[in-house]
Amino acid sequence: MQPIIETKQLTHIYSEGTPFQRAALNAVDFTAYRGEYLGIIGHTGSGKSTLIQHLNGLLKPTSGQVLYEGQDIWSDPKLTRQTRFNVGLVFQYPEYQLFEETVYKDIAFGPGNMGLAADEIDARVRRAAAFVGLKEDLLDKSPFELSGGQKRRVAIAGVIAMEPKVLILDEPTAGLDPVGVESVLSNIRDYHLAHNATIILVSHSMEEVARSVDRLVVVNDGSIPFQGTPAQVFRHGQELEDMGLGVPQMTRVFNRLRAMGANIDGSVYTVEQARAAILRAKGVG
Amino acid sequence: MALKDITLGQFFPGNSPLHRMDPRTKLIGIVLYIVALFLAKSVLTYGILFALLATLIAISRVPLKSILRGMKPVVFILIFTAILNLLYTPGETVLLKWWILTVTLEGVRTAIFMVVRIMMLITATFLLTYTTSPILLTDGIENLLGPLKRIRVPVHELAMMMSIALRFIPTLIEETDKIMSAQRARGADFESGSLLRRAKALVPLLVPLFISAFRRADELAVAMECRCYHGGEGRTRLRRLTYRALDRVTIAAALFLCAGIFVLGRFGL
Ligand SMILES: Nc1ncnc2c1ncn2[C@@H]1O[C@H](COP(=O)(O)OP(=O)(O)OP(=O)(O)O)[C@@H](O)[C@H]1O
Ligand SMILES: [Mg+2]
């Protein structure tokens, strides 16, 4: 697998030199591979948002490097700006960044900044709107007339319209109802498949990431204690609980069973896997 | 990023005697100090005031670095003042003459005094806001302006507005930072281009900022009403302000300082 974004010994200190100084990241080595669907989980205040804002050059490292396709993104101002287009970032509660008179114009803001031709912008806006399930007739409305969930979709479309190679989403489902969560997650998956894009999904819901991602990176207290496939990560059940993260329900049940002495696979995290594991343990199938 | 460097008047938590002093004492002290600054005319009196300020900074344990950083936004005003005084002070002893510009010895003197005076004035007020939490500061102002209530000045409401405004400055800065980042992620460029372009680039920042400020104001009003806030009448306080021995001594010393500087000025010092 080929790395697309890497950080090397990345350290970030907020408000350095004041009494409010706080190290949010400590010498973090992070890698995202081309075309993968990566999850980042961590407790509130662990440094997830800080980490991802480095990946597209919004925050400048206090020390260490951020590489995009092998090049240090801070080595040249042009490269920094270009990286912002290659690496799309959807912020936490992105609906608060809407500003245009119409939904259409707001989605077109990013592509417009890229300096694309008008017909290309138009095509991208419509494609992006379709991706997130916004109907055509909504495009001429004011974004401020929409519901919270719809605003969220407009904001996500605004980033998708730039068609970034890497799409990073910071808790895109926070505060949505279960149906909204499902549809946003499936929109993201569609984008992943359609563009063969790298996706980085930040979340603190284990259940949510466990279902979607290929690989998981755990952030705790400004560093990365472990990473790997969801099954590998969930083997650290106790440590995750100690970090205040918890594991998916099924994993918890199985870890408990193992603690009680059952000889059973502890790395399951979905109901289907649980069923298979139980059958295996029983010697059936 | 640059926004976070604005420390203008940011409270610096601490436990020095200056921090513990009654806010009213500090307010009165500052006013008297500024009066003294304007009465001072000689190197001697400036020296006294400077030594006093330096001692106070040392006592407050506010890092010198933060005070100097606070000076950054006024550098332009300082330079401007210096140049104006340098060029437009009439005097006898001409030091330099070039084209229509003349620099006199008096000009140099006035320029130096003016710049030092402004810097000391700013440092002194910074010392006040660095060592006094915004809540205490507005409590102090409300209390000192209390007598104005008699002539129907809504002192409590003004103080409440001020403390709310102060309370929300960091929130607004944070919010601005967040929205700026979000728009930068969509390729917005706030730093380059002509003045007009830069002004236009602010639209994606200001619209969401205003909307969220109004939303916040609305929520705050509801939250305050839910807790039965209805103005200052009959309202009691969690923190009562009390003058202690240190406060009395400080106010007396500040009055004495003012008088002393005035008298020295009379004697041409
Ligand atoms: N602008 C800032 N200035 C100062 N400190 C900050 C700033 N942003 C974040 N921090 C601090 O850095 C640490 C990491 O914050 P970060 O926003 O990266 O956490 P997070 O993992 O995204 O949390 P959440 O799940 O709540 O979004 C926190 O302790 C936070 O207080
Ligand atoms: Mg976050």
Image (cartoon, coloured by chain):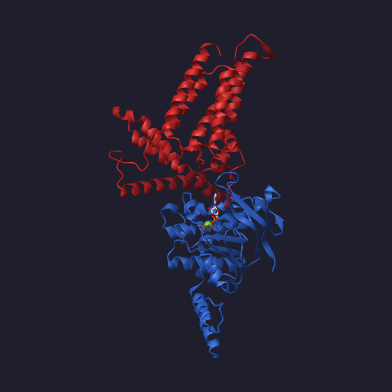
Chain colours: A blue, B red
Is A49 rendered above or below residue B136? below
Q: Quadrant of the N terminus of chain A?
A: bottom right
For image coordinates 68% across by 64% down, the residue present is A3
**Residue A78 visible, this orientation:** yes
Residue A262, image x and y in percent? 53, 84
User: Which one is in front, A50 or A95?
Assistant: A50
Q: Which residue of the protein is positioned furthest toward the top in this rendering? A: B92
Quadrant location of residue B191? Answer: top right
**Residue A142 visible, this orientation:** no
Q: Which residue of the protein is positioned furthest toward the bottom in this rendering? A: A284
Residue A176, image x and y in percent? 44, 63
How many labels sit on residues?
A: 0
Quadrant location of residue A69? Answer: bottom right
Residue A127, image x and y in percent? 54, 61
Quadrant location of residue A163? Answer: bottom right
User: Which one is in front, A41 or A185?
Assistant: A41
Q: Which residue of the protein is positioned furthest toward the left in this rendering? A: B234
User: Which one is in front, A53 or B42?
Assistant: B42
Is A278 rendered above or below residue A34? below
Q: Quadrant of the C terminus of chain A?
A: bottom right
Is A24 rendered above or below residue B137? below
Residue A216, image x and y in percent? 59, 68
User: Which one is in front, A8 or A174?
Assistant: A8
